[in-house]
Image (tube, rainbow, N blue to C red):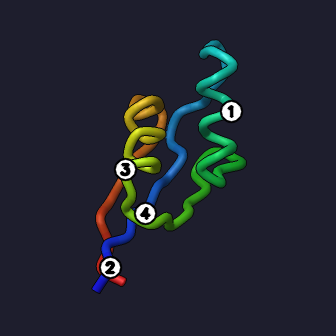
Amino acid sequence: MSKRLRITYRRSAIGHTEDQKKTIRSLGLGKLNSTVEQADTPTIRGMIAKVRHLVQVEEVDA
């Protein structure tokens, strides 16, 4: 079983830096409260760390 991460966009990126807004988009998130599942890779973990104050993350077995 590979681990996956369920990422939910919880707080607005308004007032935050442009690179944080681009990171949110790169994760596949659009509107507030949207949710995506991504593979648990070091790249995705790094992106999450950059915007951890804006998202909620759950580990999912898939």
Q: Which residue is mark 3?
A: 42
Q: Are marks 4 and 2 in contact (CB under 8 Å)?
A: no
Helix, strand or loop at label 3? It is helix
Q: If you read the primary sequence from the N terminus, does the residue marked by circle 3 or circle 2 appear first?
A: 2
- Mark 4: secondary structure: strand
What residue do we see at 60% from left, 16% from top?
A: 16
Which is more N-terminal, label 1 or label 4? 4
Earlier sequence position, callout 3 versus callout 4: 4
Question: Which residue is pictured at 45% across the width and 50% down the height?
Answer: 44
The quarter of the rendered structure image containing the N terminus is: bottom left
- Foreground of the two, 57 or 10: 57
Q: Amino acid at mark 2?
A: Ser
The kind of residue on which mark 4 rests is Arg
Residue beneath label 4, please?
6
In this rendering, the answer to whether 2 lies above or below 24 is below
Q: CA distance from mark 1 to mark 2?
A: 27 Å
Q: Is residue 62 left or right of residue 55?
A: left
Rendered location of residue 29, percent (x, y) = 64, 50
Q: Residues within 10 Å of mark 4 (few under 14, many from 20)?
A: some
Q: Amino acid at mark 3?
A: Pro
Q: Where is residue 2? Give x, y as percent.
A: 32, 79
The residue located at (32%, 60%) in the rendering is 58
In the figure, 29 relative to 1: above or below?
Answer: above
Mark 1 burial class by Cα count in 10 Å: few <14, some 14-19, many 20+: few
The residue labelled by disc 1 is 22
Mark found first going from the N terminus, 1 or 3 = 1
Q: Nearer the viewer, mark 4 or mark 2?
A: 2
* Residue 39 picture quarter: bottom left
Q: CA distance from mark 4 to mark 1?
A: 19 Å
Q: Which residue is mark 2?
A: 2
Q: Secondary structure at mark 2?
A: loop
User: Label 3, label 4: how many angstroms apart (C-alpha)?
Assistant: 15 Å
